[in-house]
Image (spheres, helix red, strand yellow):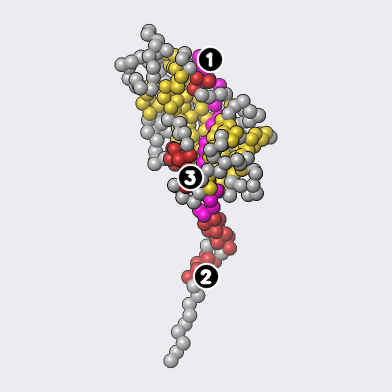
Amino acid sequence: MSTPTRRPPLALLVLPMLGGCAWFDGVKEDVDGLLDPDVIVGLFTIVEPPPAQVDLSALGLGIGMAGTVFLADARNLSALEESPVIGATVEVTGCGATVTLRDEGNGAYTLLPPTALDGCEQPILVERTDVDDGPSATIAFPAAPDFTFPTSWRPGDADVVVPLAGSPFDSALVITADLVAGEIVYSNEPQDVLETYNFLMGTGALDDIALGDGELRADTLMGLGVSGLVKMPNSDLYGANTALSILHGGRTRAWPIQTFPF
């Protein structure tokens, strides 16, 4: 009876063709990224100086760099809300300056101008620094939205359209405010970690946003703010769960729209 020929495992045949150890190391990094429980979700934007008529404070904005990061200890989507990381230290470094984000006490960490990062145009590093090998990410900033809007509007006019379809952005924040009353009228800004995750993850190409009677107010001066945001690639995430972590960077521009009778 002859002894059957034993064939080497398929992996031993394939690995040399794929670069051997280098390929295996790459796969291991991908698997580690999927299993890592450290999750970081958020966005950062550079708010540009507005036209003289626009008071950014009415839009909840200030000139400079702003952002929010959520930290969670989670291996699945449902755990994002259930397992926030509270009491961490999160720092942003860029242009030779380092700023510590404010701990909001619910897993959120925020950056609001003015800070030493205002005026920084280079990519920034966001990282958790109170533990060894905490999650971190590099965030770059695309060009600001270059849209044109009507300078005046009144009820019954065609909607003011934010032309996001076909734009280079992966997500966009849109805010309108009554600049006279100092009140936000409309905002699509997400408020918690799950809303932020869903907002940033998206479901495909962006659609235009139409602003009409519900988003604009008559007989006042309105401000319209748009943040065009771009997703950072997983290769710019370090020590984080690459399936659940997501960060966007962008720029914010504001426009005045007069709605007084004319």
- What residue span does the magenta drawing correspond to? 34-56
Residues at discs 1 and 2 in contact (Cβ within 8 Å):
no
Badge 1 or badge 3: first in the primary sequence: 1
Q: Is residue 75 magenta?
A: no
- Number of callouts: 3
Q: Which residue sits at x=57%, y=41%? A: 86
The answer to whether any part of residue 234 appears in the image is: no
Quickly name the residue at label 1: 52
Q: Nearer the viewer, mark 2 or mark 3?
A: 3
Q: Is residue 18 above or below residue 97?
A: below
Which amino acid, mark 3?
Answer: Glu
Quickly name the residue at label 2: 12
Which amino acid, mark 1?
Answer: Ala
Quadrant location, the N terminus: bottom left
| Mark 2, secondary structure of its residue | helix
Q: Which residue sits at x=35%, y=14%? A: 154
